[in-house]
Image (cartoon, rainbow, N blue to C red):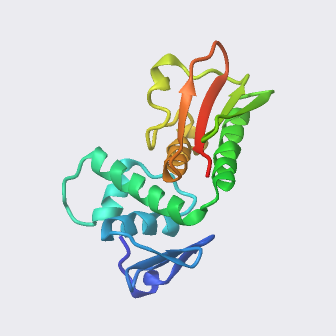
Amino acid sequence: MIASATALQTLTQGSLLIDPDQHVASFAGAPLKLTAIELGILRAFLTRPTSVFNREQLMRAAYQLNIQVSDRTIDSRIRNIRAKLAALSCDNVIEKALIVLSHLADNAMRHKAQTIRLEAADERTTLRLTVSNDGEPISAPNRDRIFDAFFTTRRDQGSTGMGLAIARAVMASHGGSIRLKPTDGGAAFELQLPLA
């Protein structure tokens, strides 16, 4: 909770700007339409950019009142913020694919991959990319949860569990999709992007 007048300064992180006094935000110079709750969540992130938040902390930051809300409520707010940022961040399908591919490559390296393989198929109206690696496999209990916001197996290493959730939001914001493919070892993801 921001209590003092000096704490209500304009907050910036990269291309994201929040003016708490005016209750407005912008991304890359374009106005970002946020609810008061979404603005509270982003303000919490920008006020403490290197911190890892759990759901309860985000709910307190967002609601700032003693209102009981569910985990699903905060998760849906995070999804809304991601979708709004993704819609403003880049309109080019190649740029979106590169954002997701770089995240998948980073994840592979963190999970001890020595090799990352990229396969592409042009299916007339869709570009299908398969990204696979020989790193640590994703355990069966975790396979259904890896795209959930805040799910991580590396919280002790500073992971927020937002990476694959953001990757899915980026893909969805352009009419695409990402899914985990079955594999005998390592991990494999299939990305589908519509071609213009």
Residue 130, percent from left and from top: 67, 30
Q: Residue at x 33, y 69 (%)?
A: 35
| Label total for image | 0
Residue 113: name its quadrant.
top right
Residue 6: name its quadrant.
bottom left
Q: Residue at x 73, y 28 (%)?
A: 112
Q: Is 15 above or below relative to 122?
A: below
Residue 56, percent from left and from top: 33, 51
Q: Residue furthest right?
A: 114
Residue 116, percent from left and from top: 77, 30
Q: Residue at x 64, y 26 (%)?
A: 188
Q: Quadrant of the N terminus?
A: bottom left
Nearer to us in this view, 190 or 128 = 128
Residue 167: name its quadrant.
top right
Q: Is 152 above or below relative to 16?
A: above
Q: Residue furthest left?
A: 67
Q: Residue furthest top?
A: 184
Q: Is residue 134 left or right of residue 70?
A: right
Q: Is 15 above or below relative to 72?
A: below
Q: Residue furthest front?
A: 124
Q: Is residue 190 left or right of residue 44?
A: right
Q: Residue at x 49, y 49 (%)?
A: 169
